[in-house]
Amino acid sequence: MKEEQPTTRVFIVHGWGDKPGDHWMPWLKGQLELKGFTVAAPAMPRTEAPAIGAWISHLRREVGETGGAAYYVGHSIGCQTIMRHLEQLPAGGTARGATFVAPWFVLTNLSAEEEPIAQPWIDTSIDFARVRSRLPELTAYFSDDDPYVSLDNQSLFEQRLAARTHLLKGLKHMGVESGMTTFPELLATTLKALG
């Protein structure tokens, strides 16, 4: 008798200053639910001043200790949170994969108020080999005119995490500021990965 695979859960992690109902996230959640997936879009704590420990702990509580059959979609600092969560999974903890939107290791054009909030995320190292070992598949979307995420990040994600990257035109930080309340490419990538 064939052993039944656990159902994949999808976690959508929003960005800094955002909430689960922002941008294209509610649309993506609804589309995936229509396809029969269990989707969680947790409201991350203190979103105006995100802290690494608080965000990782919150995601861990949502997902569970081992990660299980989880697939992740992150936006901006949500991608950082997902990487750091995967890094901290116990031995044997893995994910099905992830899709990142406007992910970053370095940021540009931050205000004086934003810099001290972002700096720990930029300065605190990530064990990329460990993340790669838990993340068999990663796709990342970048925009050619993102005011915060320079294109250097695209090559960094390719080098550090073997990400398949896509460069989109004229979508800024890929949220409502550029009219993105849907994201068909992201849905297609996610559905293909969930196969």
Image: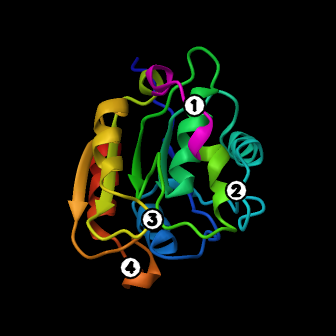
The answer to whether any part of residue 195 appears in the image is: no
Query: Front-most of 112 and 145?
Result: 112
Q: State the image quarter where residue 132 is shown.
A: top left
- Identify residue type, mark 4: Met
Q: Residue at x 34, y 71 (%)?
A: 183
Q: Quick check: can you spot residue 122?
A: yes
Image vertical order of residue 41 relative to residue 128, above or below: below
For marks 2 and 3, the one nearer the N-term is: 2
Q: How many marks?
A: 4
**In 3D space, how far apart are the residues under numbered discs 2 and 3 (Cα atoms)?**
15 Å
Q: Distance between the residues labelled 1 and 3?
A: 20 Å
Q: How crowded is mark 2: few (under 14 residues within 10 Å), some or many (20 or more)?
A: few
According to the picture, the residue beneath numbered tag 2 turns out to be: 116
Q: In the rendered structure, are the residues bearing label 4 and label 1 in contact, judged by CB atoms less than 8 Å apart?
A: no
Compute the Cα span from label 2 to label 4: 28 Å
**Of callouts 1 and 2, which one flags the residue occurring earlier in the amino acid sequence?**
2
Residue beneath disc 4: 180
Magenta highlight on residue 124: yes
Magenta stretch: give its range: 122-131
Q: Quadrant of the N terminus?
A: top left
Mark 4 vs 3, N-terminal side: 3
Q: Residue at x 32, y 46 (%)?
A: 139
Mark 4 or 1: the one toward you: 1
Rendered image: mark on residue 170: none
Label 3, on which residue?
148
Q: Is mark 3 on a helix, strand or loop?
A: loop
Where is 30 relative to 74, above or below?
below
What secondary structure is the magenta-colored segment mainly? helix
